[in-house]
Amino acid sequence: PQEDPSGTFVQLRLGLVQTSCRKRAPQRHCRVLESRRKPTCLACYKFDTSDVPKVLDKYHNCGPSHHLAAK
């Protein structure tokens, strides 16, 4: 996190992988499909400085959605 007078900013980078599990019936152990693309998501959040922080703004960029679609 990075602190600023206007709030706290948090930036996350997430690597996504496609698995053999179905979205509607999640399982604990899913096999990763190695041959699929592995897009990276960038997520940024801005929180206020109160005792119970609220999200003031957020941004998500996960690349083209067709990379995430299961065929």
Image (tube, helix red, strand yellow):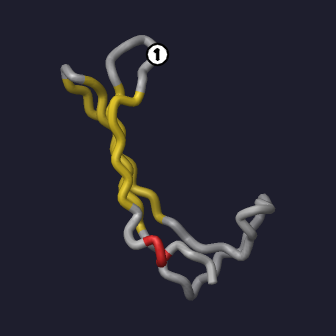
* Residue in view at x 34 percent, y 48 percent: 59
* Label 1 SS: loop
Residue at 72% of width from left, 76% of height from top? 20
Res 32 seen here: yes
- The x, y position of residue 14, in whole percent, is 45, 58
Mark 1: amino acid? Val
Depicted 63 relative to depicted 8: above or below: below
Image point (59%, 83%), residue name: 34
Along the line of sight, the residue nearer the viewer: 15 or 25: 25
Q: Position of residue 3 (x, y in %)?
A: 25, 27
Q: Position of residue 21 (x, y in %)?
A: 74, 70
Q: 43 above or below 68?
A: above
Residue under pointer 1: 52
The quadrant where residue 58 appears: top left
Residue 28, located in which quarter of the rendered image?
Answer: bottom right
Q: Position of residue 61 (x, y in %)?
A: 36, 59
Q: Residues within 10 Å of mark 1 (few under 14, many from 20)?
A: few
Which quadrant is the C terminus positioned in?
Answer: bottom right
Quarter of the image with the N terminus in it: top left
User: In this rendering, would 51 be left or right of 22?
Assistant: left
Q: Is residue 1 visible?
A: no
Toward the left, the furthest residue is 5
